Amino acid sequence: VRHKGKKSLITTTRDHNKNKKNCIYLDLFDVNSWIVPDDVKVAYFCAGVSKIDECSDFHNKSRLINVVNTLTVINKLVEKKVFLVFLSSNGVFDGIKPFCRISDSTNPLSYYAKLKAEVEEKMSMFKSPYSIVRLTKVLDSRLDLMTSWVSDLKERKKIVAFNDVTISPISSNYAGKYIFNIGNGYNHGIFHLSGQGN
């Protein structure tokens, strides 16, 4: 948001009690009455059902939130000429080929990734500029998995890690800066964000 030549940040929340000047109410279960705030220039869309298991177990709910209502909000933003940065996933690829290119065809395997790919496909028809950022796994020290591993290490407990998953992790700090710069520079296109290796 620009106000008197200065930029400010507005976030959204599902908690009515947090609804204030720079934090507005938005529940992706019900978006039809939601109105885009005035003077918004860039929107970073990172909300939705993000747990793969939850998407798999609750198809109707996750599709309503991650596709139907997500596109309703996105269309409202596009109508207001807001530059959109949509956070997607490298899960739109099947994982067989390493370091997929932007031009590679998507082939999502999980239902979560299929929903992301569906939104990407709808966005590809937009005439207005936008950005899609496909991220690998974002790891943060506050992540439940990380905190439990740290706790287990301190107690000299054995850690059982995954042996069937390959990831190329990035930090939340790195991801945040990269994503912000895309929107701040109005950089149109699809971007892949990952670590240097896997």
Image (cartoon, helix red, strand yellow):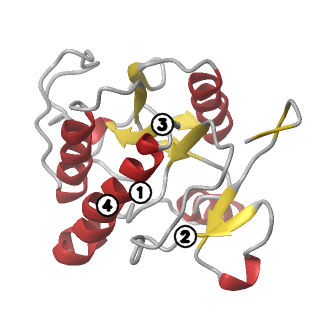
Viewer-proximal residue among 30 and 76: 76
Say the numbered circle drawn on residue 73.
Answer: 1
Residue at the disc numbered 2: 26
Image position of 66 with respect to 93: above or below: below
Q: Quadrant of the C terminus?
A: top left
Element on which disc 1 rests: helix
Q: How many C-alpha atoms fall within 10 Å of the one at disc 2: few (<14), some, or many (≥20)?
A: many
Query: Alpha-carbon distance for marks 4 and 2?
Result: 14 Å
Image position of 65 with respect to 87: above or below: below
- Labels 2 and 3 touching (C-beta < 8 A): no
Element on which disc 2 rests: loop
Viewer-proximal residue among 73 and 155: 73
Viewer-proximal residue among 38 and 24: 38
Q: Quadrant of the N terminus?
A: top right
Provide residue 121's location: percent of width, then percent of height: 19, 37
Q: Earlier in the sequence, mark 2 or mark 3?
A: 2
Residue at the disc numbered 4: 66
